[in-house]
Amino acid sequence: MCIVCFSLIASVGCNKGQDKQAGEKVTGDQDEVLVRINKYLLQKDIELIESYAQRRDWDVTQSQTGLFYEIYQRGEGDSVKAGNEVTINYVLSLLDGTICYSSEQSGPKTFTLGHSREESGLEQGLLMMRVGDKAHLILPPHLAHGLLGDENMIPARSVIVYDVEVLEAE
């Protein structure tokens, strides 16, 4: 897959002998190639996620943004809302099972929804939950750490998995 992507990106980078100046717009042909590359990568991410969930017998739902989630235990607390300060227990892992971060290592995570540097997919998932809920959240790269990863534990273009429990939302 990487060789195919590299070849497509390299072909986009070739400008057929024309010198381009900084800031010049991508041509229509290059734009079409980039769209095809993105669609291809997105489809591959979806296939990986669906296979991962199926192997674990998770009954995930895909949101309109591409977040896959399963709320597997319902709590009885208040619904999480934008602007809430939430506290969660979590395990963040890669599809290969590598645990990158967890509340067991660093304690529960507390942040304000909509005003944090957390992954947009995590925030989207939490907004579907209430205090006491437990869920699996599978974030494709565009809802996680994108093209670069987190430059620490999460590699570039990684799908990440949160196993999360909402402890508080105020």
Image: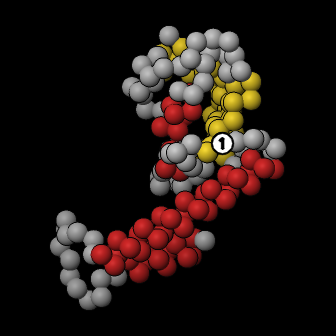
Q: What amino acid does circle 1 point to?
A: Thr
Q: Residue at x 56, y 22 (%)?
A: 109
Colour scheme: secondary structure
Q: Residues within 10 Å of mark 1 (few under 14, many from 20)?
A: some
Number of numbered discs visible in the structure rendering: 1
Q: Nearer the viewer, residue 88 or 70?
A: 70
* Res. 20 visible in picture: yes
Toward the viewer: 86 or 100?
Answer: 86
Query: Which type of secondary structure does the marked residue at label 1 adopt?
Result: strand
Residue 24 sits in quarter: bottom left
Looking at the image, residue 157 lies above or below residue 151: below
Taking depth in this image into account, of 54 and 107 the one nearest to the observer is 54
Image side of residue 3 versus residue 29, left or right:
right
Q: Residue furthest bottom?
A: 17
Q: Quadrant of the N terminus?
A: bottom right
Query: Does 116 sit left or right of 45 as displayed?
Result: left
Q: Residue at x 63, y 11 (%)?
A: 77
**Residue at x 55% of width, y 47% of height:** 66
Who is closer to the viewer here, 26 or 69? 69
**On screen, 44 above or below 36?**
above
Pinpoint residue 148: horizontal percent, then vertical percent.
47, 52
Q: Which residue is mark 1?
A: 61
Give the image location of residue 43, x and y in percent.
59, 62
- Among the 4 quarters of the image, the one containing residue 26: bottom left
Task: Please provide percent x and percent y for residue 10.
Answer: 42, 78
Residue 110: give x, y in percent of width and height: 52, 19
Q: Quadrant of residue 82?
A: top left
Residue 103, visible in the rendered structure: no
Q: Is residue 11 above or below residue 115?
A: below
Residue at image position (48%, 16%) is: 85
